[in-house]
Amino acid sequence: MACSSIGSRLDYCNSLLVGISEHNLDSIQRVQSKAARIVCNAGRHSPSSNLLHSLHWLPVCHRIEFKIATQCFKAEKTGHSSYLNNALKPYAPLRALHSYNMDLLTVPRANTSLGLRRFSVVGPRVWNRLPHELRQCNTLSSFKSNLNTHYFRRHMDN
């Protein structure tokens, strides 16, 4: 019960946190670490990385990317959220390239720091960094499961 309550609070509108400063991101990460200590009934000095691993919680930065990738999947594959689908443009090279059938999205130009945080810019960047196998998933549940595993492994490698 505590895990789902805390997780939902951390995930609420977290896609709006794209591009925030490292200082602010660290503050949110500290909140998540404290929550992990409470859920696991661990002491203040126990390492939070072990607790996050045991709870299978992604760090905040990966949770943000997870949310954006999921929104891209919903917009691209299910047609959900037509306003988001309109912001995403499939990549169409001018000549036949190997990347033509890689299910990539076009990343539009952005001239300002605020423009770099728009979904139409961040979404394709996150989507294009995903492995090809993830972009080829057919169902939302398999996509989310594989995406969570992908980010968890990436975090554990760092």
Image (tube, helix red, strand yellow):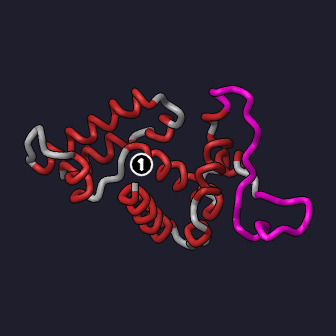
| Farthest front residue in view | 158
Q: Residue at x 79, y 70 (%)?
A: 98
Q: Is residue 132 magenta?
A: no
Q: Main secondary structure of the magenta part?
A: loop
* Image: 134 above or below 155: below
Q: Tell me where residue 107 appears, x and y as whole percent.
A: 72, 47
Quarter containing the C terminus: bottom left
From the top left corner, tell me how far across and down residue 82 is, in percent: 66, 50
The residue pinned by badge 1 equals 63
Rendering quarter of residue 135: bottom right
Decide which of 132, 10 is in the foreground and name it: 132
Q: How many marks?
A: 1
Horizontal and vertical percent for residue 25? 40, 33
Q: Quadrant of residue 54?
A: bottom left
Type of residue at label 1?
Arg
| Residue 96 located left or right of residue 36 | right
Residue drawn where x is 9% and y is 46% of the image = 42
The quadrant holding residue 130 is: bottom right
| Region of the chain picked out in magenta, as a range | 91-115
Q: Residues within 10 Å of mark 1 (few under 14, many from 20)?
A: many
Q: Residue at x 12, y 39 (%)?
A: 45
Instruction: Give the SS element for disc 1.
Output: helix
Residue 123: x %, y % from top left: 62, 48
Measuring 36% from the left and 58% from the top, which residue is drawn there?
156
Q: Is residue 91 above or below residue 102?
A: above
Residue 157 in the figure: left or right of residue 137: left
